[in-house]
Image (cartoon, coloured by chain):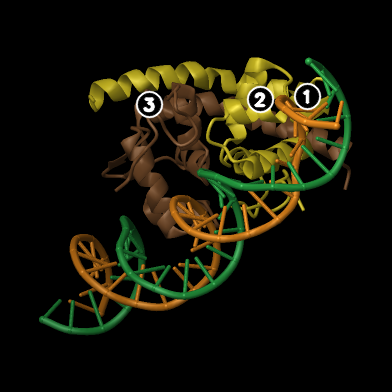
Chain colours: A brown, B yellow, C orange, D green
Amino acid sequence: MVDIPRPGQPVRGSKSGAPIMALFDLLGRNWSMGVVWVLSDIGPCTFRELQARCESISPAALNMRLKELQMARFVERTERGYALTEMGQELYADLVPLGSFAQRWGELLDKTDPK
Amino acid sequence: MVDIPRPGQPVRGSKSGAPIMALFDLLGRNWSMGVVWVLSDIGPCTFRELQARCESISPAALNMRLKELQMARFVERTERGYALTEMGQELYADLVPLGSFAQRWGELLDKTDPK
DNA sequence: TAACATGCTACAGAAAATATAGCAAGATGG
DNA sequence: CCATCTTGCTATATTTTCTGTAGCATGTTA
């Protein structure tokens, strides 16, 4: 079944199980952070809405990400659809700075590797 | 050759090329964030040191990550080995909060899913 | 000059992701 | 009460990515 990296136990890429490495393992999967981002963006929504927002994701992968994120307690199912938990919102809050960073990064790349 | 997701152009998972999605695409690869984290942790270092720190990573994957991170201008090669660029350090700074978040997350998981 | 260390490259096999089709269950409409 | 939608997936084939392991070329050290 679904198995997520957990702080405190060896996971893909970390025998020590350092919490940050477990988190990186979980978030370092295709569309993991994207799903959290989108969920915060549009609020509780259906599987198909998520699918549409995460344009290229396959249903199998989305389903897997959703299961993992639920096990990790970042996402839960409500009557209004899939939604971020409180912990998920805290995670999102810590991702927000990456949004503006990504902007600056894009500008720097444009300058250094114009094209 | 090596190709990284770039803000402003369609990438794996984002036709719009929103910078954050390009960044998520790049960071959402095995050991991407881990490498940045470790590099900041131990400072400039050799390929083999990185390999040892990223316990389970294969040299092929590490090499790929390093090439991507260099193209993205997060990592560069100095006489002292691989190192974070200024932009790489800014990225790291934005990852730091995830460190303490991961702690809290671990504690919550222990409480809700004991064992 | 033999023994390391370093930075990879080269596979083979396993795991993960994509692309696409389609089904089962519940709501909606006539 | 039956057909049509929507929703939430599952199934399968193909491709891509990662691991695990071996090993080579170059440079340094003893």
> Could you say which is closer to the camera, residue A35 or residue B35?
B35
Residue A80, compared with residue B47, is above or below; it is below
Q: Amino acid at mark 3?
A: Met
The answer to whether residue A83 is seen in the rendering is: no
- Graded by Cα atoms within 10 Å as few (under 14), some (14 to 19) or many (20 or more), the crowding at tag 1 reads few
User: CB atoms at circles 2 and 1 under 8 Å apart?
Assistant: yes
Of callouts 2 and 1, which one flags the residue occurring earlier in the amino acid sequence?
2
Q: Amino acid at mark 1?
A: Gly
| Left or right of residue D9: residue B53 | right
Is label 2 on the same chain as label 1? Answer: yes
Badge 2: residue crowd in 10 Å (few <14, some 14–19, many ≥20): some
Mark 3: which secondary structure?
helix
Residue at 52 percent across and 42 percent down: it is A34
Q: What kind of residue is marked 2?
A: Glu
Q: Residue at x 48, y 23 (%)?
A: A20
Residue at the spot of label 3:
A87
Residue in view at x 58 percent, y 42 percent: B29
Percent position (x, y) of residue B76?
Answer: 80, 29
Q: Do the dots labelled 3 and 2 sit on one chain?
A: no
Q: Quadrant of residue A100?
A: top right
Q: Chain of mark 1?
A: B
Q: Nearer the viewer, residue D22 or A34?
A: D22
Of helix, strand and loop, which one carries label 1?
strand
Judging depth in this view, the residue of C7 and A111 nearest the camera is C7
Task: For marks 3 and 1, give the CA distance.
Answer: 38 Å
Q: Which residue is mark 1?
A: B81
Q: Are marks 3 and 1 in contact (CB under 8 Å)?
A: no
Residue under label 2: B49
Can residue B21 be seen in this snapshot?
A: yes
In the rendered structure, find residue A71 and report the number of the disc placed on it. Answer: none
